[in-house]
Amino acid sequence: REHETCTMEHHLQKLLDDLGLLRYKSVFEEEAITDVALLVSMGQDGFTEAMDELGMDEAAATALKNALFSGAEQADEEEEVLLEANDDDDDEELALEENDQDDEDEMLELEENETEVPGKAPPLETPPVRSKALGVGGTVQAARYKDEGNAALQAGKHNEAVVLYTKAIECDSTEAVYFSNRSAAHLALRNFDDALADADNAVSLKPGWVKGHVRRGGALMGLSRHGEAQKAYEKAVQLEPKNAQLRRLVEEAADAAVDDVQGVGATNWVAHLNENVRHKVYYDMAQSDETEQEAYVQYQAALDGSLFDLKEACSPVMRCGVRATVADVESISSCNVEKIFVAATLVRSGTPMCVRIRHINNHYDWEDEDAPDQDALVAETMVTNSEKEHARFEAVVGCNSWLQLVPELAQEVEVAVGAGSSRQTYPAIFLERFEGSPVHELLSAEFGCGGDEDQVPEPAELDRELSLVKDVALGTLLGMRAAHEAGLVFESSGQQGPLTSTVAVREYEKQGVIQRDVKLVDVELLEEEADGDFSAKPLVHSQLADWIRQWWRATAAKLGLQDGQGLAKSQAHADVLSKYGTLNWLLFGWDDKDLHGEKIIGLLRHGPVVERSAAEMEMVERRWTAFQQEAFVRLGPRRFEEMKNQIELLNQGVVTAKEVVSRARYFMCPDHEGLHDEFKKLLLPSDK
């Protein structure tokens, strides 16, 4: 039977070669059209329709059709016999019908059919999909299901992808790619046993295909069978010796296998922390508004102290995701009711990260009664909440005002600690390490600017803290806008955020100028909203804004202002305050109707906008266009590009219009004073 099949493939390949159509060989093989008889069996009308579905151009289809059907009556007798056997085997069709009702008969039929399907995998504990007799319609339909499954898999709809790949396999169970793709979907769902079964089928059907062995390796890594995973990856490397990525997979599996033998990371340090630092004590303490913040501070200190003691005896590590990438555990950087935030570094790449681990798995840590019956519910809650948080971080990927997922672990949703009987997995999210400070550590709401109750701040210190407030406001609004575009918003009353503890700031100096990165760090405060205009209202009514206004009232009192308004004690302080009129909406709480989000962002970035008529706007546009044309000619490409870069920084809110005009002197003057004057008039029309 195998010999006949090979002969038929040769006939079809030779025919395509004679007609100059070998470019379609891979298309035919992908659709399992491997013999001339199968094409002839379609009939001329069916052939034309099938080739159109496969994307063959009309001239090529006509040439092949003429070659096939002009001598169809003389088709090879053995091919016709085989075709009839495949299409009309009453016993096989009857067996398939019986298999729909009887699993045992299905297993028997699969064993009987093994000799008819070369390379078919042996029966598994869970019944594999039956092999079916195929016509081209079945192969084409299978390919459609595969394409739909690919789209679902790429969209993160993993369960839907499994269903679609299963339908493809039901149409054609001889294609390794369908099993491989379903293995990938199972892997994404953490169904490692199913992923391995499908990978085994893919390898059995196509032993020389690299991807099948890679799928096996991934599934075995998920099952913590690291030594076997290493062997699977090594087979893949044998097939593609120059593939550096495959060699890295071998190294990772080998490292994990060695660690298994040597007991590296054998200690379940999360369980150790849970045992030594009882969560419920701090959970109860956090229920009171007066002691909530202090509860988290004490809880973090207790966790970090326990981890420090443990590190005296061993080096705690974690294994990240399916590939069991090892990370060294450094410290507990923060915590809340459900999570500990662990500072860690990936061993192989050196990537620093913050891992948010949902470590609560015992009902004792929530309530005292009926604990054993509730443990499963607690574990399910941790998984659900972590998945929801992960999806929201995915929704704001690319926004610099939100913490970002670590790219190499962006799809991973769990971390493993310990080894052997102590090994346990916990829901986890892998985020960038952001060495910033929360707002409440940077501004003193009680004593105002400078943090000293009686000391009047220097103008420079006042300028620095007002600049900080402006950067925090702008960064927060940019993050809120990105979330809004993803259908996520803070609750309109501001009661759920943003909070001072969930907005972090990192200050650094660049070319003598203080720069700041502002990031929102907690997506769980967001709620879903289908539509509505982007508004600054949640920020103005938030705890963060209340903190800033309290800081402002304390600062204003030092400056001799009444109710935060009036004239400052000195001209130097007054000059500083005049630069920050764009913060009035926040410091004095504008009406909700005036808090349109885009307008507030524009106000922070560009200052007050003078309303112009349509004719005035058209005139400004003409002036700007003419200026750009003249600037390109007079400055040359390099300096013109520098000007464009400064304008982009202005649009991003990184610099002010005055700063851009000042910087422009370096690449415009002294050669082009007139050009610089025009640039200044365009950017600062009200400047005298």
Image (cartoon, rainbow, N blue to C red):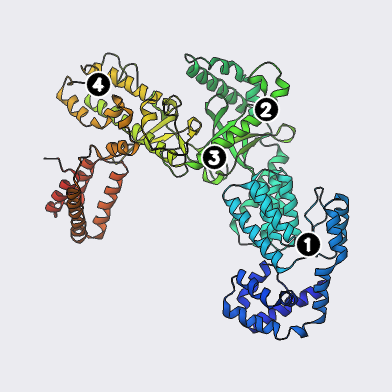
Q: Nearer the viewer, mark 1 or mark 3?
A: 1
- 685 sits to left or right of 41: left
Residue under label 1, please give it. 132
- Residue 375, x across and y down, in percent: 69, 25
Q: Which of 23 and 171 is in front in this view?
A: 171
Tell me, yes or no, if residue 233 can be seen here: no
Q: What residue type is labelled 3?
A: Ala
> Which sits earlier in the primary sequence, circle 2 or circle 3?
2
Q: Nearer the viewer, residue 45 or 172?
A: 45
Q: Which of marks 1 and 4 is in front?
A: 1
Tell me, yes or no, if residue 648 can be seen here: yes
Residue under label 2, please give it. 377
Q: Which amino acid does label 1 sit on?
A: Lys
Residue under label 3, please give it. 391
- Residue 325, x across and y down, in percent: 61, 43
Residue under label 4, please give it. 457
- Residue 208, x across and y down, in percent: 71, 63
For label 1, the SS is: loop
- How far is the residue under mark 2 from the one under mark 3? 21 Å
> Which sits earlier in the primary sequence, circle 1 or circle 3?
1
Q: Which residue is drawn at 74% across and 75% down?
A: 41
- How far is the residue under mark 1 from the one under mark 4? 83 Å
